[in-house]
Amino acid sequence: MTKRIFNFSAGPAVLPEPVIEEAKANMLSLGDTGVGVMEHSHRGAALTAVFEEAEALCRKIANIPDNYHVLFLQGGASSQFAMIPQNFLADDQTADYLVTGSWSKKAVKEAKLFGNVNIACSSEDTTFNYIPKERTHSDSPRYVHFTSNNTIYGTQFQTEPECPEGAFLVCDASSDIFSRPIDVSKYGIIYAGAQKNLGPSGVTLVIIRDDLVQASKEGLPSMQMYRTHADAKSLYNTPPAFGIYMMKLVFQWILDQGGLTGVTETNQRKAGKLYDFFEQSEMFTATAEKESRSMMNVTFVTGDADLDKDFIAYAKERDLDALKGHRSIGGMRASIYNAFPEAGVDRLIEVMQEFEASHASTSTTNSAG
Ligand SMILES: Cc1ncc(COP(=O)(O)O)c(C=O)c1O
């Protein structure tokens, strides 16, 4: 048996084991075709069926209305940072950005290449440890962009932000897509790199309203236009076929968990256990403000960088991997996306308790001595 450990990586991240098993079974032959899943033509019957099913399952999971396109693109969420303003923002127009982390800042940087940006709010003053409630919108923004979950800082919007009349809402949902119910009709565009909640890296899911596709700018390079991909049903060029296949399996797995209602219950329970632990721990503290805490990336510290380092090593020795916080902020981060097993959360709590107890006894001995 291959040994698997608890992998807290922020992305690429843990995938559901039944998905990996099924992919493994189809590597040499997709179904009974005699041709492996990575070897089929993207225009052949076998993969066409896979792509159609992936789209159908995606629509089912999120109840996506018919006037939205489901696109499977490349270039990661980072390409969407540019493609959105490139398609929708003119020189003399303004888009409002809610800046809640470095990914939002990167999105702002790209948008400035194409038009004006109004920073409607920012939590940079306290290293992005909260989601600001106050927002200052521009007079008539073309769209409002936000990052629903801030992977690095462990914060998450609890509901969609308001969007002024006449603008459309754009969401970078890379690190919490399909982790909880979503009302797609409130959005103009939702996009997400797959490598956290949806599959392997290399494919980006884009859900975009049809009237926006029709209203997008003409005359851009073909690959940069949503219209190209919507018209060609994501088959303008060779799509990331294996990634789409994996997404199809993950979508099916989500439905098997009871859909978004099912996964959200488990996610709340998993994150809840960790945050409850931090409430009573004398050593570990969650870094995000209570009302802004993420269910997907739980960030925490001991308050002593050396002790953080010791804990990360201690956990790794016990097969709890990738708990090191992002290099920009340090500390610890437990990324517990949909596919992360609850048993791994329980084990992490146990290991934190052990570590804390061993230090408590050391300090008692020290003070006694
Ligand atoms: C919220 C968020 N947005 C965007 C990105 C960048 O995604 P990609 O590497 O797919 O471009 C990440 C990556 O971790 C992310 O967490």
Image (cartoon, grey):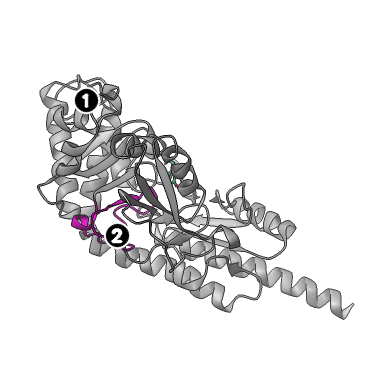
Disc 2: CA contacts within 10 A as few (<14), some (14-19) or many (>=20): some
- Which percent across, then down, holds residue 269? 38, 69
Could you say where residue 289 lies in the image, as x and y percent from the top left?
Answer: 52, 70
Q: What residue type is labelled 1?
A: Ser
Q: Nearer the viewer, residue 23 or 63?
A: 63
Disc 1 packing (10 Å; few <14; some 14–19; many ≥20):
some
Q: Give SS at disc 1.
A: loop
Q: Does the magenta stretch include residue 306?
A: no
Disc 2 secondary structure class: loop
> Which kind of residue does numbered mark 2 sit on?
Cys
Residue 201 visible, this angle: no
Task: Please say if 357 is above or below 155.
Answer: below
Question: Disc 1, ligand 1: is the CB inside 8 Å?
Answer: no
Q: Can you see residue 287?
A: yes
Residue 29, disc = 1
Instruction: Determine the residue positioned at 45% across, 67% down.
Output: 292
Type of secondary structure dominating the magenta stretch: loop
Give the residues drawn in magenta, as a range: 160-187
Give the Cα distance between marks 2 and 1.
48 Å
| Comes first in the chain, label 2 or label 1 | 1
Compare residues 64 and 310 and report the one nearer the observer.
Answer: 64
Residue sitting at 73 percent across and 69 percent down? 359
Which quarter of the rendered picture does the N terminus lie within?
Answer: top left
Q: In this view, does 154 lie to the left or right of 75?
A: right
Q: Residue 163 carries which label?
A: 2
Q: How many marks?
A: 2
Residue visible at 21% across and 30% down in the picture: 229
